[in-house]
Image (cartoon, rainbow, N blue to C red):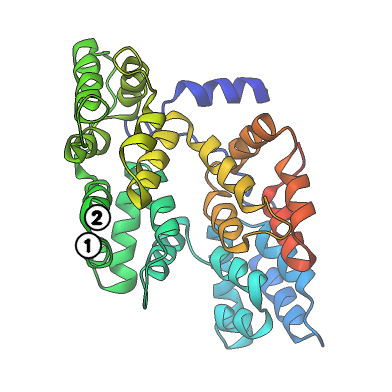
Amino acid sequence: MALVSEFLGQLTLSYGGEVEPTFPTVVAARDFDPAKDAARIETAIKTKGVDEQTITDILTRRSYEQRREIAFEYERLAKKDLITALKGALSGSLEALMLGLMKSTAQYDASELKASMKGLGTDEETLIEIVCSRNNEELAEIKKVYKEMFKKELEKDVAGDTSGDFAKLLLALVQVTKRDEPSNVVDYEKIDEDARCLYEAGVKRKGTDVATWISIMAQRSVPHLQKVFQRYKSYSPYDMKESIRKEVKGDLEKSFLTLVECFENRQLYFANRLSDAMKSKGAKEKVLTRIIVSRCEVDLMKIRTEFKKQHKRSLYQTIAEHTKGDYQKALLSLCGGDD
């Protein structure tokens, strides 16, 4: 059965057109009783020294909709807000993870974007990861939620916080009304033309015509771009990613590379990000938390498959090795099992 679902998943090309199938590791719990969960959490918070394990067990094994119901029941029972209670009871990476779970996927992405642009200096890495890896539907939802949460347009904040071609690329992606819908008809002429344009705008000439790269990558459908990158190799001595590395640098280079990696295999991109976050002795906990929390109800099951294929060991074992304590338990619970 697993094979069949994998196969069907591959048939539905992502980004636009039909709704992308999900491969979550966190799904709604059966026999769900929000009042009982709320009471258990209240007891866990009141316990001397806080019973983190119970809080983790409940919140990581419920869907977002169920967590909302628990929060509603908690407020009725404890006469205070669950998020405030969690902030008081938890700290550090575990607190950040649990508070992340109390937001919907789009709310979480929106608040991570906001945090990446707050105060002095911009956290470009987060900005690139979210803007360049989310598909059309996700970005449209993030924009809507961003405005509801922060009373500001995402575009305005991005424009105010970035500059040059980097800003132009991010803005072209954030203005998501533009991307073509995938079509059942393969337009070989257009594929050839785009491949040639990408080559002539970059490797073929002195300097790079970044605007042409931006317009093709921000406007074409993903299945079309996948074929364009294949065709590109018949014009250029370098593939698309090598060309990007040769032509542009810094944040712009990182953004284009992220885009191409996500167009080719989005779950592999996340698997590699997770692997990079756990390369050294400790772990980049912020990156780890962000990817696991934002993808656990979307496609973490598939990210796990790609991780094992690419890195020859499971995501579960890798997390177990690079993290510790209650934070580790929470991540492993969201990871949903060993491969």
Q: Please indicate, yes or no, whether residue 134 appears anywhere in the rendered image.
A: no
Q: Quadrant of residue 37?
A: bottom right
Residue occupying image coordinates x 59% and y 43%: 300
Residue 120 seen from this side: yes
Q: Residue at x 39, y 52 (%)?
A: 128
Characterize the local packing of mark 1: few (<14), some (14-19) or many (20 or more) Cα atoms within 10 angstroms.
Answer: some
Which sits in the foreground, 214 or 146? 214
Is label 2 in a helix, a strand or a loop? helix
Q: Nearer the viewer, residue 110 or 79?
A: 110
Query: Dot 2 corresponds to which residue?
Result: 167
- Tell me which corner region of the image, top left, top right, bottom left or bottom right, holds residue 206: top left
* For the residues bearing labels 1 and 2, Cβ distance under 8 angstroms: yes
The mark found on residue 76 in the picture is none
- The front one of 188 and 237 is 237
Q: Amino acid at mark 1?
A: Ala
Q: Would you say 310 lies left or right of 266 here?
A: right
Which mark sits nearer the N-terminus, 1 or 2? 1
In the rendered image, which residue does mark 1 sit on? 159
| Residue in view at x 59 percent, y 53 percent | 292
What residue is rendered at 21% in x and 37% in y? 207
Secondary element at image label 1: helix
| Coordinates of residue 141 in the picture (x, y in percent) | 33, 53
Quarter occupied by residue 91: bottom right
The residue closer to the viewer here, 124 or 206, is: 206
Lateral position of residue 46 relative to residue 270, left or right: right
Q: Residues within 10 Å of mark 2 (few under 14, many from 20)?
A: some
Q: Is residue 188 left or right of residue 242?
A: left
- Expressed as whole percent of the image width and height from the top left, the position of residue 306 reads 62, 33
- Look at label 2 and name its amino acid: Ala
CA separation in Å, label 1 and label 2: 6 Å
- Residue 312, given in percent of the width and then of the height, sits at 73, 32
Residue at the extreme right: 48
